Amino acid sequence: MKKLTTVILLYTFAFFGFSFKTKKFPDFEYLSINSEKINNSIFKNIKFVVVIGHFGCPPFMQFVKDCQDSNVDDSFQMIFILENTNSQINDFNSNEVNNWSQTRKVFGLKPLDGIVIGECSNENLKYDGKNLIISSQCRRISKKLHSKSSPSMYSVNDQGLITNKTKGYVIGLSSNERLEIILNRK
């Protein structure tokens, strides 16, 4: 009986121990919207929250609005890896009238700044009659992280290891309370 209990405990520990291990953020290399080459070396000596999402996703857009409306603490930096092209992000940030800038204005957002990456090289737009259907354009990093949620947030330490992940966005509460929960400060 002791042997059976020991074996069960060992298997349980092995299963849970391996499934909760900290893992390395997947390798990536992209050009930001500012034409800067960004890859995993950016994690050295700095803590980041990597946010993965796409334009037109209401929870992602609410997260961006909360970040823009709040005083997010400076103990970490954010990287936005968007399932859009850099051209779409530039259109989103533009003051010119286009589908992407109109999406930004509908959600009451300011242009995105900081480290912003469009991970798609080609647009994959779909129309329903005259209406543009805005959805995910590509999902390379999301697939590596086994996430289908937008937004997905990953806390990455200064060695490039994922220390926490949150998928989706909280509803209700104030914007500061939502961010505190997402950034695990509560």
Image (cartoon, rainbow, N blue to C red):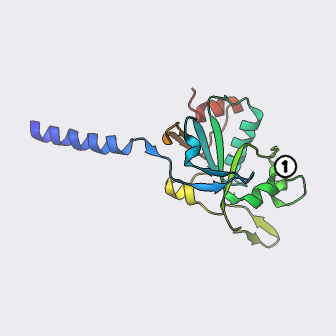
Percent across and percent down for residue 127 are 76, 71
Q: Nearer the viewer, residue 9 or 17?
A: 17
Residue found at the very far bottom of the displayed protein? 129
Residue at 64% over, 36% down: 77
Residue 171 vertical position relative to residue 58 in the rendered view, above or below:
above
Q: Which residue is mark 1?
A: 105
Residue at 90% over, 56% down: 96
Q: Is residue 21 left or right of residue 106?
A: left
Residue at 55% over, 35% down: 45
Is there any visible trace of residue 154 in the rendered image? no
Percent across and percent down for residue 124 are 69, 69
User: Which quarter of the rendered picture does the C terminus lie within?
Assistant: top right
Labels in figure, total: 1
Q: Quadrant of residue 4?
A: top left
Residue 118 vertical position relative to residue 132 in the rendered view, above or below:
above
Percent across and percent down for residue 56 are 73, 55
User: Which quarter of the rendered picture does the N terminus lie within?
Assistant: top left
Q: Quadrant of residue 68?
A: top right
Q: Secondary structure at mark 1?
A: helix
Residue found at the very far right of the displayed protein? 96
Disc 1 crowd rating (10 Å Cα; few below 14, some 14-19, many 20+) is: some
Percent across and percent down for residue 37 are 65, 53
Residue 28 vertical position relative to residue 3 in the rendered view, above or below:
below
Is there any visible trace of residue 24 in the rendered image? yes
Q: Nearer the viewer, residue 158 or 78?
A: 158
Amino acid on which disc 1 is placed: Lys
